[in-house]
Amino acid sequence: MTGKFEIMEDMNAWSPLRYGIFYHSDPGALATSETQMYIDSSVTPWDTTYNVEWNGSESGSYGYMFTPRLGTNGVPSGSGGSGEVWATENGNWISTWTSTSPIGVVPPAPARAYMTAGVYNFAMSVQLVRGINEVRFYMVKEIATGEEQPDYWFGGILDDPNRVASMINGICFSINNNAEDMTGYKLSEVKVDYTDPFTIPEKPFSSYYLDNWAFGRGLTGGWDLEYGDFVGDVGVSGTAAPDTTVTVRGEFIEPHPLKEGKALQVTGSITLVGGGFEDANSLRFGLFYSEAAGVMWQDSTVDSNWVWNGTHEHHTGYLILPQSGTNGPAEWAGIGATGTWGGVVDGSWLNTDDARSNVLGSQAHTAGAVAGAGTYDFVIEVVPLADGTNKVAFRLDNTDGSYSVFGSAVDNHVALVADEFNCVGFAIDNSTTTAMNLTEVMVDMIPSGTVGVDKDGPALPMVYALHQNYPNPFNPTSTIKYELPEMSDVSLVVYNLLGREIIRLVDRSMRAGYHQVQWNGIDARGRAVTSGLYIARLVTPEYTKSIKMLLLK
């Protein structure tokens, strides 16, 4: 089943759209009803509208319902758990609570995307493969003129081993009443066919800040965890140095496989208070993949802090142990080697005692530099190479210029460490450090020809700059890029033409570098603004500039 689905307004709520393919045991027949509406007595007193509806039952349905997630709203839940794709067996097709069970969690792309007004191509299919039902689906917005990828993507291939449906006799679409601004939708070019399985359109990617942060289980060090004011920020702290290693793990929105010609990159800042990582091996961080970390929950045994309820074990990826002063490289006891970074294979992400690990190198930091309290910018990236190996690189630089360490190596081990990643981990165990704050932690996929880690470090901007938003005009999302040659207090505020403040996109101290932020046409209270001209104004102690942005719906 293929076709086009058009919405006239933006849609961003919890599970407002539900649709699917079903066998209805009692659809009834098409029935027409009349409704008389009072219009204007000076023209005609009444107008008659005609509605057509199936007069059977929504229950007694067998098939597959799709409930795509929108924006930052949670995963739809039901009697069988949570998910975005549901198998219905003799239940109500529109409900997740009657004889239904989830068969997949499928986040939208780009990260946190919601459905904006426009036309979406959709497809749904069911195929019997090796005794189970293979369910394919996608709902993808048509690519706007001048853009390279769609604003919204939802799709996948899932298996239903229970085969809740052996035939299909209809498709259904529904808009929930929590989509308050919706006034209608249109279906067109809807076609049913027996044909070869269709190909899912390529998933788009857009950089995003991490917001799934929690302590590692059993390793809180007596500290507390607090989310920052902005997505991408988290802090852990105590009244004294930790009594055990403190670990913080941030999970991606979804696993990201490595892509040819692209570098998977994670950037951000680590601020250490009271002390730095002067003690040997007291700071550890890296990029990993694991399905064993469990889920986030508030653990009452550690003051209801957020904790991953799984394990540190069974992580695979790259671990970095930067050194300070005259400290030597860490011992990787499991393989009888030393090094400042290496690969972890199905082991504890913060330990170096596994026999399956490997060392990538021993990188020297700035000669004699002691890594004390302060803010350190970091970059980690992995690039897949044509010969099946990975190029891995990292940087760690104190923003005051006193400390720097860089590493780059090709992971050519016979058992490649990883070809996809879903998390980052940070650990601190220094005798004087009382807090570790992570800020602006961002996941990105950049062209491998513009790799941001090199021996001399990524060049910092020479001057302040605010660039014109792109696209412009836009609907509803546009990106604003700006540059800071030094750490600065920054505010970036959107105003209407009357000078009224619409929303503060940035209002904080930010590190030197290249930055970007998106505005999705929403005000500070979460309401969509009207079409028109808006002003974005960047203000720092040394620089002020404004640009005009045109929102066209």
Image (cartoon, grey):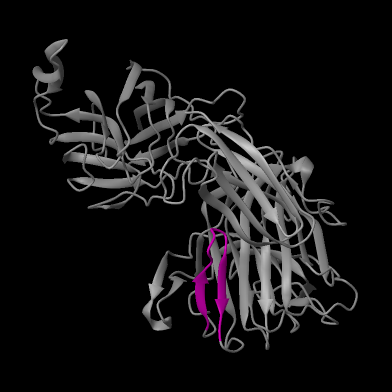
User: Is 479 displayed left or right of 122 in the figure?
Assistant: right
Assess whether residue 231 is covered by the magenta stretch.
yes
Assess whether residue 483 is covered by the magenta stretch.
no
Is residue 201 or residue 458 the one in the foreground? Answer: 458
Query: Is residue 192 depicted above or below 484 in this figure?
Result: above
Tell me the magenta residue range: 223-238
Outermost residue toward the right in this view: 367
Query: Is residue 364 depicted above or below 540 in this figure?
Result: below
User: Is 404 displayed left or right of 19 in the figure?
Assistant: right
Q: List x then y, in percent, for residue 209.
A: 57, 54
Q: List x then y, in percent, for residue 288.
A: 60, 60
Query: Is residue 57 depicted above or below 504 in this figure?
Result: above
Query: Is residue 456 depicted above or below 215 in this figure?
Result: above
User: Residue at left 13%, top 11%?
Assistant: 44
Outermost residue toward the top in this view: 43
Q: List x then y, in percent, for residue 542.
A: 77, 57
User: Is 63 displayed left or right of 483 in the figure?
Assistant: left
State whether residue 424 appears in this view.
yes
The mark tally for this picture is 0
Q: In which quarter of the image is the N terminus?
A: top left
State whether residue 391 appears in this view.
no
Quadrant in the picture for residue 46: top left
User: Residue at left 23%, top 24%?
Assistant: 170
User: Is 26 displayed left or right of 222 in the figure?
Assistant: left
Is residue 174 or residue 273 the one in the foreground? Answer: 273
User: Residue at left 38%, top 24%?
Assistant: 6
Q: List x then y, in percent, for residue 114.
A: 44, 40
Quadrant in the picture for residue 488: bottom right
